[in-house]
Image (tube, rainbow, N blue to C red):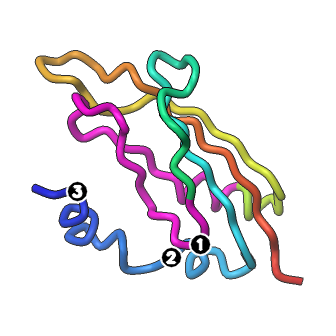
């Protein structure tokens, strides 16, 4: 099943982070995929106000690994933080019970409405 279909079928593409946090004027988010918590494997994925709620794991062997980004943004917005950073181990698996060894590293900047 294509990932886009999964995101749409779960209703994740129905709203935006701006809808969730109306005080946000603009946002810039970078998501790095790190293997074993080390240096980035690829360029970061970059998002603006079109930021999806979930970001899929970049490990091609990973099954069902994803990171929920919007709660990180909600916490930052509730504290009126202009920058934020969060690191989390992937929750997916590489098969036969082996956990995915990738880590999500999310960082970004928020501009608020005045």
Q: Which residue is mark 3?
A: 3
Q: Nearer the viewer, mark 2 or mark 1?
A: 1
Q: Is residue 93 above or below residue 55?
A: above
Check disc 2 and report its element: helix, strand or loop. loop
Give how far apart the Cα atoms at labels 2 and 3 are.
18 Å
Q: CB atoms at circles 2 and 1 under 8 Å apart?
A: yes
Q: Which of the 4 quarters of the picture holds residue 78?
A: bottom right
Which mark identifies residue 18?
none
Magenta-drawn segment:
47-75
- What residue is shown at x 56% (from left), y 17% (from top)? 38
View extreme (right): residue: 114
Residue 61 lies in magenta, yes or no?
yes
Label 1 neighbour load within 10 Å: few <14, some 14-19, many 20+: some
- Residue drawn at x 64%, y 58% is 73
Which residue occupies 32% across, 23% down? Answer: 100
Coordinates of residue 23 in the picture (x, y in percent):
74, 79
Task: Please name the residue shown 55% across and 27% down the image.
Answer: 40
Q: Secondary structure at mark 3?
A: helix
Q: Secondary structure at mark 1?
A: loop
Q: Which residue is mark 1?
A: 49
Q: Could you say which disc has been placed on residue 16 in the image?
A: 2
User: Is residue 50 located in the magenta-colored stretch of the structure?
Assistant: yes
């Amino acid at each position: 099943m294509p990932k886009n279909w999964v995101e749409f079928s779960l209703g994740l593409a129905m709203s935006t982070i701006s809808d969730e946090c109306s005080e946000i004027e603009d946002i810039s988010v970078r998501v790095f995929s790190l293997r074993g918590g080390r240096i980035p494997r690829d360029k970061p994925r970059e998002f603006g106000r079109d930021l999806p709620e979930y970001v899929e794991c970049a490990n091609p062997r990973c099954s069902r690994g994803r990171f929920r980004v919007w709660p990180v943004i909600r916490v930052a917005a509730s504290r009126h933080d202009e920058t934020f950073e969060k690191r989390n181990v992937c929750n997916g698996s590489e098969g036969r019970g082996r956990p995915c060894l990738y880590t999500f590293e999310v960082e970004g900047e928020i501009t608020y409405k005045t």
